[in-house]
């Protein structure tokens, strides 16, 4: 199966449909260089001071820099991009009542880096065997540099969201999601994929934003990454999307069944 590719005028419905069919899709050059330049300059000091990963899965020559909501205001335009958010919502909210931001992270793969083990992102929840019609997560990877096969573009297996769980597909079964800067790859939490090997002499930098059903624990603790006084400076929709809202019926309440936005509004 091929990796579905779209141009920037695509509708969120078409993207959601492609995610249902292939488990992954690329929208080419969805945002312009000017936005990517701003994001790059805002995150670079943090990336530079981030240590390499401690194991092969995190990548011993890969830097992972999080807390992007608090660290880069231009990043908010990526996290809230309406085509992406609406497509993700369509997929996750087929079963869940609401969704949230699960993780924000620059993934910066240095030259001479090995490929990552092929995996499903939804294994983060203790390998819980979600039924295949339950898509609880959609990950996105924005290209802050061009993504090429040589520099370690994310490798995906289109159609693998319908495969059995806990497989170990070999690298050879994956294809590189090559895309120019400003493009975004979307892939379901059930899609087998992994970071590529970087055989180029330049870094491969992606902006990873993952969304999940809001009844699940977030990988990045958004209340520490973005405490209420910081959340008060955000667009309220973004504050709600990182978790300052109630998931399902009462999930996430505090005090006397209060809505989390009450804690944020104290700082307004
Ligand atoms: O860096 C990439 O291209 C993918 C990374 C990834 O899949 C992960 O860390 O879960
Ligand atoms: Fe992954």
Image (tube, grey):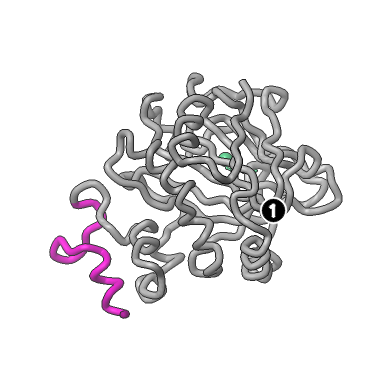
Q: Is residue 240 above or below residue 234?
A: above
Is residue 108 something that shows in the picture? no
Does any portion of residue 261 appear in the rendered image?
A: yes
Give the crowd class for mark 1: few <14, some 14-19, many >=20 residues within 10 Å. Answer: many
User: Is 49 rendered above or below residue 57?
Assistant: below
In the picture as drawn, the residue positioned furthest to the front comes out as 9
**Residue sitting at 78 percent across and 44 percent down?**
151
Callout 1: helix, strand or loop? strand
Seen at 64% across and 57% down, the residue is 32
- Name the residue nearer the viewer: 119 or 29: 29
Quarter of the figure that contains the N terminus: top right
Instruction: State which region is magenta.
Output: 250-268
Can you tell which quarter of the image residue 226 is in? Answer: bottom left
Is the residue 48 above or below the residue 160 in the image?
A: below
- Residue 216 located left or right of residue 172: left
**Rendering coords of residue 19 (x, y %):** 49, 32
186 vs 199, nearest the viewer: 186
Q: Which residue is mark 1?
A: 205
Q: Camera-side residue: 169 or 56?
A: 169
> Residue 44 location, x and y as percent?
68, 67
Q: Who's the residue at 37% across and 56% down the image?
A: 241
Quarter of the image for the C terminus: give it.
bottom left
């Amino acid at each position: 199966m091929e990796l579905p590719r779209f141009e920037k005028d695509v509708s969120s419905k078409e993207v959601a449909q492609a995610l249902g069919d292939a488990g992954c899709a690329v929208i080419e050059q969805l945002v312009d260089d000017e936005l990517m330049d701003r994001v790059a300059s805002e995150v670079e000091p943090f990336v530079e001071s981030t240590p390499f990963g401690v194991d092969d899965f995190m990548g011993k020559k890969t830097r992972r820099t999080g807390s992007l909501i608090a660290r880069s205001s231009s990043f908010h335009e990526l996290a809230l991009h309406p085509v992406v958010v609406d497509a993700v919502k369509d997929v996750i909210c087929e079963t869940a009542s609401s969704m949230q931001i699960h993780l924000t992270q620059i993934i910066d793969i240095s030259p001479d880096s090995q490929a990552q083990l092929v995996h499903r992102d939804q294994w983060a929840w203790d390998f819980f065997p979600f039924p295949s019609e339950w898509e609880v997560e959609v990950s996105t990877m924005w290209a802050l540099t061009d993504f090429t096969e040589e520099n370690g573009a994310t490798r995906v297996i289109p159609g693998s969201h319908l495969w059995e769980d806990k497989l170990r597909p070999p690298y050879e079964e994956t294809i590189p999601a090559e895309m120019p800067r400003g493009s975004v790859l979307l892939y379901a939490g059930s899609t087998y994929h992994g970071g590529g090997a970087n055989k180029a002499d330049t870094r491969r930098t992606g902006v990873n934003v993952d969304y999940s059903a809001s009844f699940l624990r977030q990988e990045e603790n958004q209340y520490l990454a973005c405490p209420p006084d910081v959340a008060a400076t955000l667009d309220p929709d973004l504050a709600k999307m990182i978790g300052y809202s109630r998931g399902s019926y009462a999930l996430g309440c505090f005090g006397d069944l209060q809505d989390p936005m009450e804690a944020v509004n104290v700082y307004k």
